[in-house]
Image (tube, coloured by chain):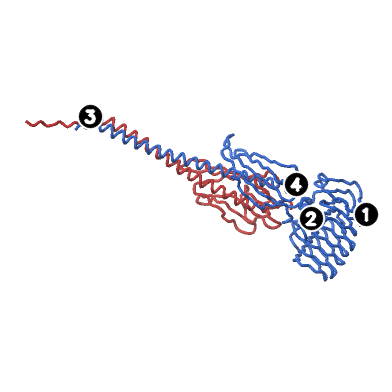
Chain colours: A blue, B red
Amino acid sequence: MNNQGYVLVMGLLIASALLILLSTITGTIIIQRRLVDRSYHRERALALAESGIDIAIACLNEGDLLEPYLEISEEIPEMGTFQVNLSDSTDSTITLASTGYSKRGEKEKAQRTVEVTANLTMEGTAFAYAVASGGNITIEDEETTIEGDVAAVGSVDVEDATITGTITEEAELEFPEFDSDYYLANADTVIGEDWEIKEESDYPIDGIVYVKGDVKIEGSTLIGPGVIVAEGKIKIEDAILGTSSEGVGLISMSSEEEAIKIEGDDTEIYGMLWAPDGGVKIENEVILYGSVVSGGDIKIEDGPGLTHYLDFNPEIYAYFKGNYLITSWSEIL
Amino acid sequence: MATVKKSQGFTIIEVLIASTVSLISLGVICTAYYVGMETFRFNQKRMEAINTLCLSTDRIKKDIREGEKFISFVNFPDYFSVSIPNDSLAFTTDDITAIAFYFEKDSNGQFHLYKKTAGSGPEVIISFDPGVEVKPEFSNISDFSVQINLTAEWIYRGKTKKTGEISSMVTLRNWNR
């Protein structure tokens, strides 16, 4: 038998085995490297997408985005970009779809999209209380009823009145920061002097009505949704403001004790009252569905019925610095 | 008469050539295997570092969202009795609570993410693998938002290798409220 040449065959076999081993190692490393890269860029894309959501929610809450908004995009150097689209906007709900693009140089390596739904609420603000004061609260008369929580930075003095919720004295309250420029810039109507509405029926308050003086509303019916912002005092007497769905809010910039005064047995208000620097007085058998917030003292007497109510068409919440809170989060694959 | 078959061996030249070829082949294989294993180990380390970076950012983001106001480093002594690094990210969540996040190396050279709440001691939130160095950068982009940049490097046999970088923008959701 001729064995000549078997060394060559053996050599080739060994060389082939080594080549296979080498290519397997190389292949494994390449696959692993790609997996790590892919995972890395996907994580970065998700971080970018979530950055977009954070920025968009902050813009919404700061009032930097007003309709028709609808797109935010930004670049984080050496990382990538994000793009947020705001869609399906109703008065109270907004859907944000944010896509993060992770890049290496100019080349896009991965993208991920996150979709969240955010609802406008008064949660986390002083309006989450029926009555909230930066000073003291006095509630008198046995016929006075308050359905909801009452809180004051100072004291709460309750004489004979009925309060169904909790009473908190020396509370740490989060009062929204008042920004008159925001209301003036976004006002639908600006009235340059004192304003009086008397014996008017179905008077529309649509959006922001900015009054550069005092406001007096008497014997009238006002329809929302909207808010009256007065640089002076606001006085309401025997008037009906808003409905259970379309509220009418009142904001007074006055720093006087009775910046907002509500009186009259026939007064019925659906809306929120806010006196950032002054006090509020509510008397007689006024019926109020909403919330009363004041930087000064609040006096409620002579039997009003106040119910904490925040089921209005939430468009009005934007006027009172409501917060958009994320209610659902999902990734679009 | 019986003839004796002369056995054929290898010449010295053949042996030398075969040995050289074998040595070269072995060298190539060993080098490739070594480089392969190093790359494999680096990728594993990289993946772990990336995961830890992501966890760190998530953890910081979660608390910032509850925040109200950022604290400048010049005001750290007003809020924290124990000194914290100047490059810490600090913010208040209400009138009395302040939180700071910072990265620091322990005596063994291992990096940790610390959370310091005013009035209590620092707490290790996340620990990085030994050998991984973290370079944090917190830059405020507005009164209510911050950009977090975290870079991880792996120091292995005296060489520094960048394993990953992650950036995220996050906002104080209780700012101005």
Judge depth for marks 1 and 3 and give the one in front: 1
Q: Secondary structure at mark 1?
A: strand
User: Does mark 4 fall on the same chain as mark 2?
Assistant: yes
C-alpha distance separating marks 3 and 4: 91 Å
Q: Residue at x 78, y 52 (%)?
A: A316
Give the residue type that dot 2 points to: Ser
Q: Is residue B27 above or below residue A209?
A: above
Q: Secondary structure at mark 2?
A: loop
Instruction: Identify the residue under disc 1.
Output: A198
Give the residue type that dot 4 points to: Gly
Q: What chain letter is assigned to the residue under label 4?
A: A
Judge depth for marks 1 and 4 and give the one in front: 1
Judge depth for marks 3 and 4 and give the one in front: 4
Q: What chain letter is assigned to the residue under label 3?
A: B
Residue A175 lies, in percent from the top left, at 76, 55
Instruction: Identify the residue under disc 2.
Output: A245
* Mark toward the start of the polypeptide (2 vs 4): 4
C-alpha distance separating marks 2 and 4: 23 Å
Q: Secondary structure at mark 4?
A: loop
C-alpha distance separating marks 2 and 1: 24 Å
* Mark toward the start of the polypeptide (1 vs 4): 4
Instruction: Identify the residue under disc 3.
Output: B11
User: Does mark 4 fall on the same chain as mark 3?
Assistant: no
Left or right: A100 in relation to A271: left
Instruction: Identify the residue under disc 4.
Output: A63
Q: Tell which of A254 and B129 is nearer to you.
A: A254
Judge depth for marks 2 and 1 and give the one in front: 2
* Mark toward the start of the polypeptide (2 vs 1): 1
Q: Is residue A47 above or below residue A288?
A: above
User: Does mark 3 fall on the same chain as mark 1?
Assistant: no
